[in-house]
Amino acid sequence: MTHCLYYDHPYMREFDARILRRLEVDGRPAVVLDRTAFYPTGGGQPCDLGELSGMAVLDVQPADDGPLHVLAGDLTADEVRGRLDWARRFDHMQQHTGQHILSQACIRALGAETVGFHLGAEVCTIDLDRAGVPVEGMVVAEALANQVVTENRAVSARFVSPEELAGLPMRRPPQVEGAVRVVQIADFDCSACGGTHLRCTAEVGLIKIRSAERHRGGTTRVTFLCGGRALADYDRKQRLVQALVGHFTTGEQELLETVQRLAQEVKDARRAQRAAQEALIGAEAGRLVAEAEVVVGVRIVKALFSGPDWDAAVVKALATRLAEQPRCVALLGWQGEKSQLTFACAADVSADMGALMRVACERIGGRGGGRPDWAQGGGPGGAPLAEGLAVALEALQTT
């Protein structure tokens, strides 16, 4: 059975140990040691990483006789020297201790219990047992959590008997029987937990809530960062703000107002552009109908577009407008980075646009199809659309 050093010595970075068992896990060598400071994955906290006698530890998994250390390669000696990735371990202790503080703060500020916790590679989350948590309540919870950090309260962890456990103010009843490991934050929180934690709340650093959103099962998922992660996030956002200030040549305090004003200007410009396009489409539709060839009482509009004033969407809108004209057929093409054909006809015209599209696409080396009243297709940018339109017109005239 392995002596788990991380319970009593969470700040231990190096240790000596002896290999008790060798095995394979998913095709990789793994070992069980007589003592280890490597925390295995569990309780919402990822495992520690590092090395054993210079060999990388890729994963640490829980097992009945002690943590399994999955390695990058074989170890030949029975005696090993373990070295933790300390930056990863300390980050995990910051996040996990911060979670205990924040969970208790949510109880006091919101009356909301934590029913789930995940310590991710980038962010951490807790799930609260209620939906629709007010923003103001989360602000109060965050402020309380950071107050506990600045008060530098002691953090302790120990195994207690069931008898002693009954007299402790546990945040939630433990789900296991027998001796339970309890993590206490002085005069603030008392929880059953097997993870690694700091010795005082000041080491947690800043606790910052990033979001609180409705989650499945009537819960609220709170995303948060602690310590180094929170500072890195602040630095990233500060650099982003400064870049935006420089880009818009405005002060930081006026940045939101500037962005809102520009967004309104873009909205207005798009509205004006749509109005101009509608006018262009209407004028072009009128011109094309007036100049259209009439065959057996049907006006046939055949046109090919390109240039900055036309794109695939505008040509589609033009086809729709033409199809609203009585006894009208539109055979339209757009030549750009990709070639596109759009065929449409009025409801009082007996023709099959889908069939015409297949004929045209076969000629241009493209693909397409559609309904009797509407069809689309296309091909590469250099496709001979004029030839495609010509064969479609010929097929229409012979039907």
Image (cartoon, helix red, strand yellow):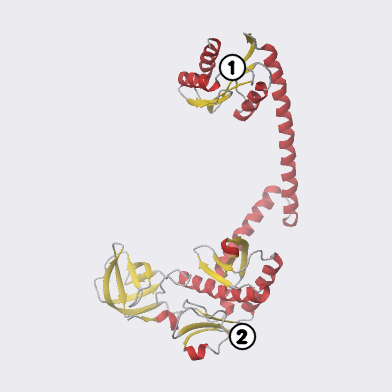
Within 10 Å of disc 2 (Cα), the crowding (few <14, some 14-19, many 20+) is: few
Callout 1 environment at 10 Å: few (<14), some (14 to 19), or many (20+)? some
Residue at image x 57%, y 61%? 216
Identify residue type, mark 1.
Ser
Q: How many marks?
A: 2
The label on residue 350 is: 1
**For this rendering, which residue is in front, 210 or 50?**
210
Q: Which residue is mark 2?
A: 187
Q: Residue 15's x, y, as percent?
A: 36, 79
* Residue nearest the viewer, comparing 391 with 310: 391
Check disc 1 and report its element: helix, strand or loop. Answer: loop
Q: In the visual, does 21 lie left or right of 152? A: left
Q: SS at mark 2?
A: loop
- Write down the quadrant of residue 135 in the picture: bottom right
Quadrant where the N terminus sits is bottom left
Q: Residue 5: x and y, percent? A: 40, 81
**Depth order, front residue of 118/374:** 374
Task: Name the residue: 55% across, 10% down.
Answer: 397
Dividing the picture into quarters, in which one does residue 143 lie? bottom right
Q: Position of residue 363 (x, y in %)?
A: 46, 18
- Pointer 1 and pointer 2: residues touching (CB < 8 Å)? no
Q: Nearer the viewer, mark 1 or mark 2?
A: 1
User: Would residue 123 be seen by someone viewing this image from the given angle?
Assistant: yes
Residue at the left extreme, as displayed: 76
Q: Where is 310 relative to 24, above or below?
A: above
Residue 30 spot, x, y in % from top left = 30, 69
Q: Which residue is drawn at the image coordinates 74% and 41% (left, top)? A: 265
* Disc 1 to disc 2, C-alpha distance: 84 Å
